[in-house]
């Protein structure tokens, strides 16, 4: 199957695109976009991959579902476009940046600036129906994004995997911790941020690890 995605990712993911599950997933997603309001916009489904080519990946932050509110999801996990109110989870991420790095976060919730530096902002499920969180789970996206994590684990060295919450941590169970850094904590959601996300210092940990391996740190 010919999928419109950054060529570097196409090269490593083509075996997935040719599998029967992905063909079924594609049929389901196309039908959903035709009949319902689905987020993100269809042109942004693979935004995380297009913003961060395979060879550029230094860090992966794994989310679960795209935002399901109008105009929120832009194809990057935890990110919203310029001019959109910063969602609560991202507000908490910004609070932790402020605490961890002693710097004021930007007003915009658009995280494309991270993507351009090599931070793959990947949701486990890449699409969702408006107002219905989890509506596109168990349709094949998880199998696809499991393959993405597996390929990064196998083909790259010294990647930082940031796994917030039990869902992301389960997805990262098979990461080789001898050649990558895995940072785990509670999710930044308002329901769980005070159970171990605040004070976890993922951003300084990430940069210290990158510098240790002669990789340019991220300007969070």
Image (cartoon, grey):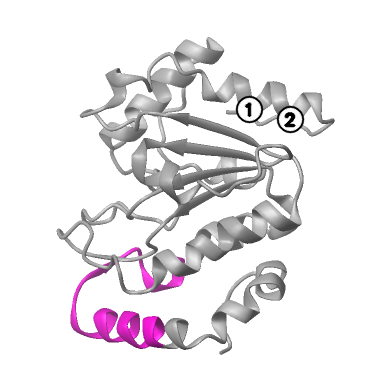
| Spatial separation of the CA atoms under disc 2 and disc 1 | 6 Å
Q: Position of residue 2 (x, y in %)?
A: 58, 88
136 on left or right of 75 = left
Q: Position of residue 218 (x, y in %)?
A: 66, 31
**For the residue carrying disc 2, how many other residues have a C-alpha within 10 Å: few (<14), some (14-19), or many (20+)?**
many
Judging depth in this view, the residue of 105 and 150 nearest the camera is 150
Judging depth in this view, the residue of 149 and 115 nearest the camera is 149
Q: Position of residue 156 (x, y in %)?
A: 75, 51
35 on left or right of 80 = left
183 on left or right of 92 = right
User: Dot 1: what SS?
Assistant: helix
Residue stretch in magenta? 24-44
Q: Which residue is mark 1?
A: 206
Quarter residue 82 falls in:
top left
Viewer can see residue 114: yes
Q: Are marks 2 and 1 in contact (CB under 8 Å)?
A: yes
For residue 118, above or below residue 212:
below
Image quadrant holding the C terminus, namely top right
For residue 219, above or below residue 5:
above
**For the residue carrying disc 1, how many other residues have a C-alpha within 10 Å: few (<14), some (14-19), or many (20+)?**
many
**Which mark is on residue 210?**
2
Give the residue drawn at x 47%, y 38%.
163
For residue 29, above or below residue 99:
below
Magenta stretch: residue 121 in it?
A: no
């Amino acid at each position: 199957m010919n999928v419109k995605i950054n060529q570097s990712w196409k090269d490593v993911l083509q075996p997935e695109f040719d599998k029967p599950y992905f063909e079924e997933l594609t049929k389901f997603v196309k039908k959903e976009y035709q009949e319902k309001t689905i987020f993100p916009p269809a042109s942004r489904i693979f935004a995380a991959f297009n913003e961060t080519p395979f060879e550029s990946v230094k860090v992966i932050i794994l989310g679960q579902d795209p935002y399901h509110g109008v105009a929120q999801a832009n194809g990057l996990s935890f990110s919203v476009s310029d001019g959109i109110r910063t969602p609560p989870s991202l507000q908490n991420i910004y609070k932790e940046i402020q605490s961890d790095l002693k710097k004021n976060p930007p007003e915009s919730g658009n995280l494309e600036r991270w993507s351009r530096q090599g931070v793959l902002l990947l949701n486990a499920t890449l699409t969702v129906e408006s107002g219905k969180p989890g509506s596109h789970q168990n349709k094949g996206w998880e199998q696809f994004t499991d393959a993405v994590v597996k390929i990064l684990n196998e083909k790259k060295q010294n990647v930082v995997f940031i796994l917030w919450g039990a869902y992301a941590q389960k997805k990262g169970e098979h990461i080789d911790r001898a050649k990558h850094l895995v940072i785990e904590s509670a999710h930044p959601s308002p329901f769980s941020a005070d159970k171990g996300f605040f004070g976890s210092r993922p951003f300084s940990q990430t940069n210290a690890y990158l510098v240790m391996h002669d990789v340019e740190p991220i300007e969070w």
